[in-house]
Amino acid sequence: MSVVKGVASPLEKYDGSSLRILIVHTRWNPSVVDELVKGVVDTMTKEHSVKSENITIQTVSGSFELPFAAQRLIAASRLQATPNAAELFSTLGENTGPPPVNSQTFDAAICIGVLIKGSTMHFEYISEAVSNGIMRVGLDTGIPCIFGVLTCLTDEQALERSGLGVSEKKHNHGIDWGHCAVELAIKNRRWTVGEI
Ligand SMILES: Nc1c(NC[C@H](O)[C@H](O)[C@H](O)CO)[nH]c(=O)[nH]c1=O
Ligand SMILES: CC(=O)[C@@H](O)COP(=O)(O)O
């Protein structure tokens, strides 16, 4: 068991009570993905006071769809949060109506999926595309976009990294992603107003 590997705790405990979080997760390998999502949500709500009503959860088919969905959902939330959203919405058709009162853009997005190597190179191509795509969404939108995709060679590796494994090394990586999302969302707010 490694004595080096792992992430150190942050220097402060971040209050997520005002944060708005987007979670996009896949429907591939659902037994593992669902456990990872639970780890993220439980960590944010129980350890950082993120309100459940401020967590938006959307699903896509597979990991390859994660970057597209995250980018489009961030864009849609920005449309809803714009000052003249009602006017913009009215131009979209008479049935759209005004945006929800509490609609605002997201403070962070978390993309969650599980890739498990098969017998072709499909795994390698998707892994590379998805990791680059998720990184690009964060850089292009300015909204922290957390890489919550397990890239596993075996089922056992996926089970271990979602806390469903049988060894003492098992750890739900969703916990780390929940902490990471809150920390970067708070820091991004501070950096955006010049607090460095
Ligand atoms: N094999 C896995 C996939 N494959 C599906 C792709 O992600 C994508 O949905 C499809 O190519 C259509 O664009 N997805 C996973 O998330 N996990 C896998 O193990
Ligand atoms: C990650 C994948 O796309 C993989 O599970 C597909 O399996 P295969 O390479 O056997 O087609």
Image (cartoon, rainbow, N blue to C red):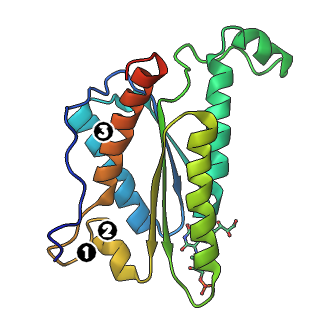
| Nearer mark to the viewer, of 2 and 1 | 2
Question: Total of numbered circles in the picture?
Answer: 3
Which of these two is toward me, 21 or 98?
A: 21
Ranked by sequence position, the earlier of labels 2 and 3 is 3
Q: Is residue 62 visible?
A: no
Q: Is 161 rendered above or below residue 26? A: below
Q: Given contact means CB atoms under 8 Å apart, are the residues at marks 2 and 1 in contact?
A: yes
Q: Is 5 rendered above or below residue 10? A: below
Q: Residue at x 22, y 70 (%)?
A: 170
Q: Residue at x 30, y 38 (%)?
A: 44
Three-letter code, disc 3: Met
Which of these two is toward me, 188 or 46?
A: 188
Q: Given contact means CB atoms under 8 Å apart, are the residues at marks 2 and 3 in contact?
A: no
Task: Identify the mark at residue 161; answer none if there is no mark.
Answer: 2
Q: Identify the secondary structure beneath mark 3.
A: helix
Find disc 1 in the rendering and name its residue.
Answer: 165
3D distance between C-alphas at marks 2 and 1: 7 Å
Q: Could you tell me residue 75's position as x and y percent?
A: 67, 32
Q: Quadrant of residue 105?
A: top right
Q: Identify the secondary structure beneath mark 1.
A: loop
Which of these two is toward me, 81 or 4?
A: 4
Find disc 3 in the rendering and name its residue.
Answer: 44
3D distance between C-alphas at marks 1 and 3: 23 Å
